[in-house]
Each structure stands twice: as C-alpha cells, then as structure tokens.
Amino acid sequence: MDLVINPAGISLLGYVLGGVKMDILKEDTIAAITTPFGTGGTGKIRISGPGAFQIGDKIFKSINKNKKISEQKTYTAHYGYIYDPETAKEVDEVIAIMMRKPHSFTGEDVLEIDCHGGMTPLRAVLDIVLANGGRIAEPGEFSQRAFLNGRLDLAQAEAIIDIINSKTEKSLDLALNQLNGKLSTKIDQIKENAVELLAHLEAAIDYPEDEIAGFSAAELGDKFLQIKLELEKLISSSQQGKIYKEGLKTVIVGKPNVGKSSLLNYFLEEKRAIVTDIPGTTRDVIEEYVNLKGIPLKIIDTAGIRETADEVEKIGVERTRNLAEKADLILFMVDLNQGITTEDREIYQLIKDKPVIVIANKTDLEFKNTRQEILTEFRDHPLLWISLLKEEGLIELKDSILSEILAEKIDLDSETIITKTRHKDALKSALSAIEKVIVSHETGMPYDFLTIDLKDCLNSLGKITGETVADDILDRIFSEFCLGK
Amino acid sequence: MDFHKYPKEYDVIVIGAGHAGCEASLAPARMGLETLTLTVNLDHVAFMPCNPSLGGPGKSHIVREIDALGGEMARNMDKTMIQIRMLNTSKGPAVHGLRGQSDKAAYHRRMKQVLEQQDKLDLKQEIAEEIVVENGQVRGVITKTGIFFAGKKVILTTGTFLKGRIIIGEAEFNAGPNQQYPANKLSGSLKKLGINLRRFKTGTPPRVSKRSLDFSKMEPQPGETGLSFSFDSEPLSEEQVMCYLTYTTEETHSIIRDNKMRTPLFSGVIEGVGPRYCPSIEDKVVRFPDKNRHQLFIEPEGLNTDEYYISGLSTSLPHDVQIEMARTIPGLENVEIMRPGYAIEYDCVDPEELKLDLELKKIKGLYTAGQINGSSGYEEAAGQGLIAGINAALSLQDREAVILKRSQAYIGVLIDDLVTKGTPEPYRVMTSRAEYRLLLRQDNADQRLTPLGKEIGLVSEERYQKYKNKLTAIKNIISYLRDPENKVNPTAEVREKLTDLSSGNLSKPVSLEKLLRRPEISYADLKFFTDGLPEATADVIEQIEIQVKYKGYIDRQQAQVDQFRKMEEKKIPVEIDYDKLENLRLEAREKLAKIRPLSIGQASRISGVSPADISALMIYLEQYRRNQGGNTSGN
C-alpha cells in the first residue's frame, strides 16, 4: 500500500485489512477550535456533523437544568457550562449556539461553543468534545463539507484545494516534526506488537489446518494488556504535556555586560514574527516565551537579566545556582573581548553539570584568548561563536539549541512529545479499541471478534504515523508462518 | 485465415468450461439467452486439476454465495462429494468454513450433464484462437478448426490454458493443466487487442497409488454428518471416505536441499509469479529452515479410482527427486507415484484492465473471469464466472450490471480487490481481506444474496418462498424472545437451573433475549425458562443464536458500513477526463485514469491515490456537476 505519507506525519487515512478507508469520507462529526491560536477574549469551538447535538447533550449543562441542546430551535444561543461527563466537573462557562442543517456554514448540524479565551480552556473543552463522539477536523475540512453541501461558491473551491494540498507540502514546525518522529518510534513499537498479534490471529483464522505455534489465552491477555499500558502511558504524558504547556525552561547566565539582554531581545524580536501559542503569554512578567521552530522556550528570570545588565556588580552566586536548578537548558555567555575571567569560571562551575550551550559573544571585536584556549576551557559543552551586534552566528545558535534538545541531552522524556490534539485523539481511540479487545478476550470471545477491535486500534495508530497496515499484515502472515498446502 | 461462419448466432459465447466457465455459461442460458460454451476437451468440463476438494474459510463463503445467487457449484458438490467437515469451529461463526472432498470424476460428469441438459446452452469441443472485434465491440470467436461463431458477448474463462507451460525439474513442455492441449494462440489475439498480459505460475503435488500407501502410519481425518454446501440440499447422508494426515521428515527436507539447484524455482527456469499462500514444498523448506516437519493431507481423488492426492507436497522438483523425497514420508515408504507434481506457467490479464462488472475497459462485450484475471482457486473462479455470466446477460437485457459491494459478499471483495488494486501474485480469497467479516458469514449468504438472485432471475419462486419462510421464522422467534411478557423472573427454580448451566445469577427479571446472550446458554436451554418456546429448524436456531449472541459486534460492523455508504454510493461520471484535474498529483491522475473507478469509495481504495487526492477529486466532481447544470451533489 503506498498511500502518501505527508511530511508532518499527519494522515487522514484509516486502514482496514483489504481496503483503505479515509476519515474524510466518513459521515461523522468533526470538531476544532476555529479561532486563531494565541490570546484573545473568547475562543470558539465548532462541532459539525450528524452527532453534533448529541455531543451537546452530553457535555453542555444549561443554567436551566432540563434544557437539552438537541431539542432547541435552530439559531438559538444557550448559556451554561461545559462539563466533563467522566469527572462531572465543570470546565468552562460558555454560550452554545446551534444551527440545524442545512442552514449552517457546513450545511450540517452545527454546534458552536463560545468559551473563554486562552488555549488552556479551549483545549480542555475540545478534549471533552473529542472524548464524547467528535473527531478532530482535518485542515480545510469544514470548508470542504460546506462546499460539498452546496454552501460555498465555485471560486472558493480552488482555495479549499489549496488548503488541502498545503498541509501535505508545507513544512510546518521542523522541530515539532522531529519530536513527532520520536513519537512515531514509540508508536511503531506498539504497532509492531499489535501487528504481530493480528498476523497471528489472522493466520490462525484463515489457515485452520496449518500448524501455527499458538499463544495461550493467558499470553494473549498479557500482550493485549501490555499494549493498553503503553498507550495509557503515552496518553497520560500528553495530558501533562510539560513542554507544550510550559515551554522548555531556559536561562541565560553570564557576567554583567556580556550581552544577555541583547540575546534576549534578539529572541524577542523573533517572537514578533513567530507567534507562540502558549497560554497566558504576556510581556511584563519575569518569563518570556520564544518559539524556536515549534518548540517553546520559556526564558526565565528575564527581569534578572535586565537588572544585571544595567548594573556593574558581582554575580549573585545564589541566584545563579537557583536558576541552574530550575532550568532545562542553560545558555552561558562569555565575552570574547574581555576573555575568560575568574567570574566566568565561577559561574561555569555552578552550571557545568546541566545541559549547557556556551555562547561566545562579540566575534566582531578583538579576541583576548585564542579560539583553541576557549574551546579547551569549555570542551564538555557545545560552543557557538556569535556577534549579537552584527547578528552573526545566530542562526547556528538556534540550530544548536534545537539539536541539543533533539539529541535528548535535555530530558524531554515521553511526557513532552505528544503535542498535537490529533495525535492525542488517535491515541485515545486506539486505547478504547484495545480495551474492547481485552473485554472480548476476557469474556471468551473467539479470535475473529478480537481482530475487529485490534484492527481499529492499529487503524488509529496508523493515523499518527501515516502508514497503512493492510499489506503489512499479509506480508507478516506469510513471512512468519509457513501456510498453505 | 479462412473460416466458415456458423449458422446460429449466439448472445453469449463462453470460452472454457472449467469452474468459471460452467457458471458463466449456465447463468445467461438460464436467463433466457442463447449461449455457447467452447472447451478444449469435453472430458474435462468442471475438471479439478489440483486438489480434490472445495471450501475452507473464505472459499466456502464464496460457494454459498454462488448458491444464494442461483449458481451451480454448491449443488454440484453436494450431489457428488464423498466427505464434508466444518473447519474453524473453535473460532467465531464468521470464519467457520465448510470443506468438502470431491469425487473428481463424478463432479465433472454431473456438471457436464447439467450443461448438456440446460435449455439454450450448446456445449462444444473447440479450441478458440481469435477474438473477433470490430470498432471496439466484440463480434465472436474463430476456432482452430476454422469456424467463426458470432456472439454479442464473449466471456473468457481460460484458466491456466493460455500459453500454458508445464515444468517438472529440467523437463518442460507446452501444456494446459493435467497435460491437456494448451491454448497457444488466444493470448496473441488478446495482445493484438491491446490487452495487458502477465505471467503467473502455480503448481500441484504428485498423485500416488492407494496400494502403495500404509495408512496405519497416518492419522485418520474423518468427515462429519449434518452438513451440505447448498441452502437447498439435504445433508450428506452416504458413508464418507477417510482422509489421512502425515508429515514430512528431516530426511525429506535434506533431499530437497541437496537438489535445490535442480528445482526450476531456484534455477531460474520459472519466470511466472507464484502465490505465497500455496507454496511448493521446496519453497517451504527453503524459507522456513527451522520447521522440522510440514503437514501432508492424503486425500482420495474419487470413489472409482485408487489415485490419492498429497495435499501439501506441491512441487516442480525433477521426477526422480519427487520419488526419492516422497519415500521418506511415514506411510509413503513404498509409494508409487502415478502422476508427478508439476508447476504450470500461464498468461493472464492484468485485472486493472477490467471494470467491476468484469467487462474489459478496452473492448465492449468482452468479459474475463477466473484464473485469467489473476485469481487462483476453483471457488474464486466460479464466483467470477457467475458474475461475468450474469452481467453479460443483464447487459443484453438492458438491465443494470450486478456489482456486489464489499459489505455484501466475498465475491464483491474478490472482484473489487482484483479490479481496483490489481494483484502481484495469484489471488486467493481470505477472510482477512474482508473488512466486514462478521457480516459476510457463510451461514447468512442466503440472507445476503437470495433476493438479488431472485431479481436477476436465477432463483426459483419455490426457493425464494423457502427463504422468505426462514426469514419470517427468525423474525417471529426474535420478537418472542424480546417480548416483555416472556421475561424470566429470578425464582429459586430459575436460579438453580442457571447454576446447573454454570451461568451467573439473576437479580431482576430479564428478557429471554438477554439470557440467550450469555455464551453458555443455548436456544434449547431456553425451554426451561419459558413455556411457549417456538420450535425451529437447526438453520433458524443457528441464525437466532448468532444474531442474539453477537449483536453488539454485528451492530458495530453495520455502523461502519453505514459510515462509508455515502462514499460508496457517490458515483463518478464515466466521462470524467482526469487530465483536466490539474490539482491532482500526476501519479494519482494516471492511476485514476487507468482504473476509472465508479465511485469515490472505489477511488479511495486505489493504491497511489491519497486522501488529499480524493478531497480534490470530490471538489472537482462537485464543480463538474454544477457546470453540467445539475443540482448540488446527491446527499
């Protein structure tokens, strides 16, 4: 099967043995945040499709307790709360607006939920929608449905095709993609286990007379459970989503006047061009967010950087030590013109056991030490030569920060790698499928009932890595088992 | 070439009278059309050149589907078989599979007579050599003896006859299956018509003499009672023959390994692509060196012959090596081989050349079915033959073609797979190829397809009534089981009975349906819990148990079918010019232009067509419709 795998690792396709199905072809209910990422007073989630109002009934609690969304008239707005049916907790205070088909943007039943702004509440509400029957919309999918239902004119059709095409061609966030590569590796391992099981079950089903070294019921149970546990681990980590929610804690240290605030400003300049979608980002706190090709860096103690930049004082040992403890990454700056001083060495002693990138600034001026001397001094860490004044070496600096992150010298751990709602959505369906397999197995259902949900599980995982497994299974069956007569 | 026009003109001409050809001939004749069947040798009508059996998972499903649609295979088997079993009973109902041992000669004789006695069907021994086509429309066939038969439709069911070549070790010669006369010229005619051909390979094991076998060293494999293929037949009542199981030994394997360079498979003599699921013994030994034995089933070829078939020992090793190898097998120490195993290579059509109704895209009125389409297996062939025959006839009657859906029949899965995705190797049906396996059971093939068979005109009124009565019985019993009046109360007696049945206790009244949902409780057990439990036949009870016990799973698969139905039904106009779809990637455009899918659903299954391509295609189609002045797409 050679369906296209797009570079972002996003795939629309589902898989089934013997045929390829695509989510986009399904008559299902899709949802997404439709307001732009970033901060804003309110945010909107749109739910479209035949199940939109049922989802509304499940997750929306009106102020008037008995009000059911599905029973309301078209073009009405309802005030109430979104709550999570699982925890029974209220998540956000919202206005729900309903539009019955065909009188909506997509021409389908649509429920729009106006939430409070900020990504955290919006994501929380979206998660609940997805957990209760929605599927995350593909880019351009609302518009596509609108067009196919006759709600858009011809001119707009071309634009939609562009959106659809762009998502496969545009290289989005490079760094995120690489992180997703790590996710793929983990998912590949889970998938591998599931494929092994499925090939085994299918071989036994289609070749009842062949000798197939079997798994015992207990072994099968263990293997299903293993898949479940691994999926749970991945999902729970995504909920913490450390890096995604909080950013990679980064500090800039160095003696006064070494260029810390210039470096910060340089990063902040960049920030204006690349808007981060980290919640609660504001300029006036002591933290600043920088989006480095998709990875949010949280530069902490920026106030400290600015203060010390103006004062000539001895370095605060305590302060540096504290910062070093908190940080995931330390950018340590030295001044080439002044050369390596005792102060530099004192600071370096405090931080050298952490992930450090040494930044040798002021290549535009005369060097006090030779390059070799400096490299030797800091040989345990990557070192970049830059000039903030002339803006030289800065691109290399960013690449170096990225490669430092991606080389896993910084402890990102699995917690940090699930960054996309789409992925989380897919993992959750995979989990729910494997749970069904386990129930079937425990109630003593025969093999072919187990395969139904096991295929679903693989199908969901395939959406993340973009591969279909249909032919894999056949190849697997015939390479692993000697079958046929 | 000089030829003489045969005075009678036919509606349908079928070339070949194997399993595809017989169904392809009977269907149009039974639908009232003048039909001619040509075969290389009349003594080989419905001949089984390989295993003397039908069925297994997936395959028996197809046999029953053929039966429900009004085909002949199941009935013919029931009338002539000598053993039957149900395989896979430890697994769910969807993958149970009947396996019948056939009496090859009886199977052939009976089917030949059915053809002979069929109204409007002429059966003739002739070798077809040229397909006559005018302006892209088929006109008839010219034979080796110089006769031109005019026909409005031609169906090719040539099996492995096209440029057939048999290989046994270093020996090779042109021949069809079982050393019959090959069809050397017909593939040339196809090539001239611009049809893309390829070369496949398959093989068969040696046949041996019963006298030389020692059954005491083998495990007996008896048949079972109460089973039949056709929904119309009574279960097989005659005494059944015995099959046997034995195994290869390390010694067998070392003989094979020592002679590896004399095997055509490894020496490069064989060019054709063989099937992975039906490997030769040399293939198995080389690919799975760790396996110290392979199973062999010893099966009789019929009641009036002493030839036995060694299932699992398919080979193209040199004859002398076959003898040496066979004698290392327990029970075969003194074996006399009567016919050596062989590999056969043959030309077949790239199935991507076909439409879903099995007509070639390039030539109007020309259909192909069976092994010529890259499939393998008697059942797969017969299923295609039936559909090709039906569609040729329907087309002549100006009726819409029958295209079985993937959610409707294994025959639908088989044809859609072949036509939409092509096949790199001889294609065998497997239950794992069906995405809606639970709906496509062999036990419900009648429910899936009898109404269609009736509509086509191949199912008799009598049979249809029988089917309707079965449906009514099922419906009545299900509503009895659901009726609140018949609820079971948790009395002491009931509790005791449940304990007896090792079933969990009851705390409040439940319906009979809920009770039956418990795996340990059968329909017969329900008698204890209700007074008026309706009597029912075994096939009705089977349906009720399956429908009740597996309801949750069945409903879920049905929901999956429904989700994709809209796309399966979203038709693509035949006149679409894919070159105009500039937004599609070139690869996708080429693939779509080649396959010319009928629906978005089918398009989505083509390899090389991505979801983004499908989105673009859907939008293009909507634009196209609006430009044609049509309404917005059919929702």
Image (cartoon, coloured by chain):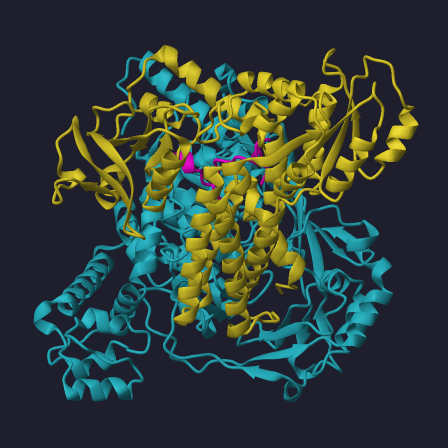
Chain colours: A yellow, B cyan
Residue B501, compared with residue A183, is above or below; it is below
Farthest left residue in view: B485
User: What residue do we see at 48% from left, 23% from top?
Assistant: A284
Image mark count: 0
In this image, B358 relative to B337: left or right?
left
Q: Which is more toward the observer, A386 or B88? A: A386
Question: Where's the N terminus of chain A, which quadrant?
Answer: top right
Region of the chain picked out in magenta, as a range: A1-25
Residue B94, compared with residue A466, is above or below; it is below
User: What residue do we see at 13% from left, 44% from top?
Assistant: A65
Q: Quadrant of residue A346?
A: top right
Q: Which is more toward the observer, B375 or A366? A: A366
Question: Where's the C terminus of chain A, which quadrant?
Answer: bottom right
Residue A409, compared with residue B43, is above or below; it is above
Work out whether residue B76 can be spotted: yes
User: What residue do we see at 80% from left, 76% from top?
Assistant: B251
In this image, A72 relative to B558: left or right?
left
Q: Which is more toward the observer, B124 or A379? A: A379
The percent coordinates of residue B96 (x first, y second) are 43, 67
In this image, A314 relative to B239: left or right?
right
The percent coordinates of residue A135 (x first, y second) are 38, 39
The percent coordinates of residue A405 (x first, y second) are 67, 37
Farthest front residue in view: A313
Mainly helix, strand or loop, the magenta region? Answer: loop
Residue A58 on the magenta segment: no
